[in-house]
Image (spheres, grey):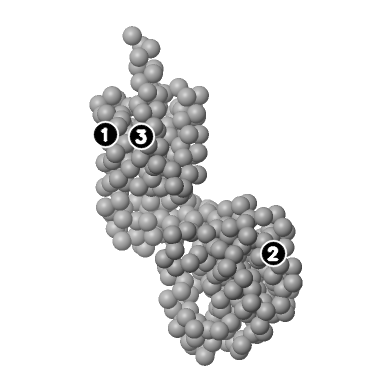
Amino acid sequence: MNATADPGSVRLPPWLDEIWSRVGAARDSQRLAHAMIITGPQGVGKRELAEAFARSLLCRARDAEGYACGHCPDCLLLAAGSHPDLTRVGPEPGGKSREISVGTIRTFSEHESLTPSRADWKVALIDPADHLNPSAANALLKTLEEPSGQTLLCLIAEHSGQLPATIRSRCLQIKVPIPDESVALAWLSGRLPCPDMDPIIPLRLAHGAPLRALVEFDQDLFDQRRQRLEGFIDLALGRRDPVVEAAAWTAQGPAQMLDWLSGWVCDLLRLKAVPEAVKLINPDQREAFSQLAERIESAAGHRFLKRIMESRALADSNLNHSLMLEALAIDWFRLSQRIETRRY
């Protein structure tokens, strides 16, 4: 689903219906907040929601469900990316830093002080808002404290807790949760490019986020996951050198590899605690992980998972990712050999 390609055809996925009704009612009754934070995990539709709502505010001929018509002059400007009353604020394109700088916010604030050019509202999409650096957040706070009349500031964030409390307290917070799995599976069915693939596997690998499952579905990536899983298991069985396997982890990319590792270890710990555990992130690996769970101690496994999570938080930093992954590979090798060693 592409929520930006054709505003006339946009319909949000079903798990967003209730939120869409609420924000639409606030818009229609003129009770709309001047600032909101739309927050939720990657791939649940928060950006699609923000985009659709911004278009609905600027369209003068909304349909019965409150969506932009897609055909009026304002919608045509939106489709062309040239509507004067829609502003997008984010990191500098092509910049080395993923932060939103104070200069960007100051430039935006100067523009924000103007009245709408042609629509009833001015809308600013600030994305990702959790990448505002401290100076930029302070500069934005001044705008939030003195909002213009018909202006909506829409902040989009996966980690709204990283925003200062002073900003969060001045915004209406809209949380987009992971949808019910049955709803997500029904929506995914028929949308995956590989019709033979059980949609529960990409959905679980995307941690229940359907849009992420759809975007990240790639047969090559699934093949790479299988190869890295083989290496992970071979490490536990003592059949592979951890330094050699760590090099393959680094080549895979730290963010992807750490995401896989956390899922594998979470499943192992679930099966260690409850061998009949129903819900696994990797349901296709139940048998292999059940056997592997016998090789680890629960307390040591939880400590290892904590190290993985700490490493995930540093995946975007300038740390030496190769050394970080190598340390994790060695830790996993030693951890999984511990019980085997005690048997002799």
Q: State the CA–CA distance, disc 1 to disc 2.
A: 49 Å
What residue does disc 3 label?
326
Crowd band around label 2 with a 10 angstrom C-alpha radius: few (<14), some (14–19), many (20+): some
Labels 3 and 2: the sequence-earlier one: 2
The reply to whether discs 1 and 2 touch (Cβ–Cβ < 8 Å) is: no
Image spot of residue 278 (x, y percent):
46, 38
Kindly identify which numbered label has been placed on residue 244: 1
Residue at (50% x, 64% y) in the render? 91
Please tell me whether residue 49 is drawn above or below residue 268 in the rendered image. Answer: below
Q: Which of 105 and 209 is in front in this view?
A: 105
Q: Which amino acid does label 1 sit on?
A: Val
Among the 4 quarters of the image, the one containing residue 251: top left
Query: Can residue 148 be seen from the camera position used here?
Result: yes
Q: State the CA–CA distance, disc 3 to disc 2.
A: 42 Å
Q: State the CA–CA distance, disc 1 to disc 3.
A: 9 Å
Instruction: Give the structural element (helix, strand or loop) at label 3.
Output: helix
Residue at (74% x, 68% y) in the render? 145
Q: Nearer the viewer, residue 105 or 232?
A: 105
Crowd band around label 1 with a 10 angstrom C-alpha radius: few (<14), some (14–19), many (20+): few
